[in-house]
Structures are given as C-alpha cells and as structure tokens.
Image (cartoon, rainbow, N blue to C red):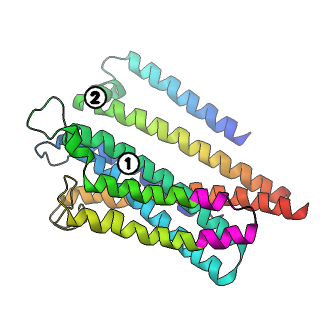
Amino acid sequence: MKIKSILLLFLFCFISINLLAQDENGGMASLMRSNGRIYVVVAVVLLILAGLILYLVRLDKKISKLEKDN
Amino acid sequence: MYKSWWKITGVVLVIYTCTAGFLLDVPQLPALGETIRNLYFHVCMWFAMMILFSISMVNAIRYLRTFDLKYDIYARQFAVVGIIFGILGYATGAIWMSFTWADPNNPTFDSFSTVARDPKLIGAAIALLVYFAYLVLRDSVNDMDKRARISSVYNIFAYAMLFPSIWIIPRLLPSLHPGGENGNPALDTKDIDGSMRMVFYPAIIGWTLIGVWITTLKIRINLLKEKKLSSL
C-alpha cells in the first residue's frame, strides 16, 4: 500500500513536469535546454537508476517478508 | 546484511555519481575528450568486481576453517555478482575503446586487430573465464560437502590467478590501456585531475555498495532455500 502511494506520488511529479514543459520561458524548460541539453541525459539516467533501485528495494522487502514467515 | 543505512549510502553515492559525473567540468584531452567521464562508470565496475572477488575468497577461506555451509553460499554469490560486474566492465570498455583507440573515422588511430591483441583485454578475459570455471565446477558436484570443499579451494586459486592476469602481465607488456609500464591508472596523483577524484572515489564506494546489496539479496534467498530443504 505504502509503495503504491509512493509510486502515485512519482506519477504526479511527472505530470507537473509535463505542465512545466508547456511554458516556453519556464524555469524547468530553460534549464533542460541549457548547456547543450546535458540535463536531459542526466534526467534519463537518473530515471533508469531510480527504477532499478526501486526494484531492488521491493525485492529486499519481499525477501524480508519471506524470512519472517519462515 | 539486514541494516539499511549502507544501502541508502550506496544509492545516494550512485545518484551523486550520475549527476555530478555528467555535469561537472572535466579536462579536455586529445582523443579522450568527454569520454573521460567513463572513469566514473567503466573503471568503477572493475573496482567493484575486485572487491566482490576479494570478499568471495575470504568467505571461501572461512568455509575451509569452519566447514559451515553458510560461508560456501556467501562465497558463491559474491563470485557471481563479481562476474556480472566484470562483464559490465568488459562491455563498457569495448564501447569506450572503439571510439578512443580504434576510431574507424580517424586514419591515424590503430586498427581493430591491434586493439584486440591488447594484453589488458586478454588478461581480463582469462580472469573472467577462470571465474566462469568456478561456477561450472561448483554446480557440477552433487554432494553438498564435497562441492563446498572443492569449490572453496578452487576459489582461492582463481583469486590468485587474478593478479598475474589483470595486474602483472598487462603491466609488463606494451599496452594501449592506461597503466601499462608506468604505474597505476587513475590512482596515480599525476594521472587524473583533482576535481575528478571528487566524483571518482564516491563512485567506487557507491557502485561497490550496490553490488554488495544485490549479493546479500541473493544470499538471503539461498539461505531460505537451504532452510526449506533441511526442514523437509
């Protein structure tokens, strides 16, 4: 349940990024377009990393539960 | 194994590596250019592999001292995750070298056949194959005690083979890889810029901790399996 609400929170965060991108002169949009757009790469890498780490955390929790049951 | 503070440290350090590693300025050298940022990723894979193999060997010795099967499981899982990091190091190195040592668009660069004969590449391949053989050997013996004993002894020999194949022989022969005849690449104080160390050292610790975390998960599953088997 907790994890689902955290995932939902992430989802809502990304919806707001989408809204910010609509604003041509907005803070996030200009940041993402500055410096040869390297920030876009950083965002992609961090998202992949976040996905992998979230997967590890979930595995860890599942194994902890199994250990408790035994 | 069950505490979470070091897992959080590992995650924070890897996230720091992936942000600072891309955003901080790096010195521009001919042929390398921005690719020197690979130092935070490619080199760290090998560091993590070396540390995981060391822990594996220590656990093999612990098994031989106590004959507790738990340590045999530790040794095997650390070796497996070490191999995964080694393969990642090899694959990332293959990408890096094809654009710095053997660029097909640049006629002054060495041809691919010279690169493929590089002692560092062959040495790393031998080291990984020796560890593949460890897995084949360990999983082909059915008797649990015999398996643990044989594979623990082999593990120590495999670790001893690591040193000539990836540390000594590449240092004796001319190599395109940094750290041929002149010392240790990246660790030498004259080799990389001070600002890069700010990311490089945390990156080593971060990637290693992630590797150890994955290993502990595998160990815990295997200990559970063992428990289930013995309770039947």
**x, y percent for residue B215:** 59, 58
Image side of residue B208 versus residue B225, left or right: left
For the residue pair A9 and B197, the one nearer the viewer reads as B197
Q: Are marks 2 and 1 on the same chain?
A: no
Badge 1 sits on which subunit? B
Q: Is residue B103 visible?
A: yes
* Boundaries of the magenta span: B135-152
Residue at numbered disc 1: B90
The mark closer to the camera, 2 or 1, is 1
Q: Position of residue B176 (x, y in %)?
A: 19, 52
Which residue is situated farthest in the right direction here? B232
Residue B187 lies in the magenta stretch = no
Viewer can see residue B9: no
Task: Specify the amino acid type for callout 1.
Answer: Tyr
Q: Is residue B201 above or below residue B114?
A: below
Give how far apart the Cα atoms at labels 2 and 1 are. Answer: 29 Å
| Residue at (26, 62) in percent of width and height | B170
**Which residue, given by chain and number where applicable, does mark 2 sit on?**
A37
Residue B182 is left or right of residue A10, and the answer is left
Task: Tell me where residue B165 appears, x and y as whole percent.
Answer: 35, 64
Q: Given the image, on which type of amino acid does mark 2 rest?
A: Arg
Percent of width and height locating residue B169: 28, 65
Residue A12, which numbered label?
A: none
Q: Is residue A51 above or below residue B221?
A: above
Q: Residues within 10 Å of mark 1 (few under 14, many from 20)?
A: many
Secondary structure at badge 1 equals helix
State whether the magenta stretch is mostly helix, strand or loop. Answer: helix
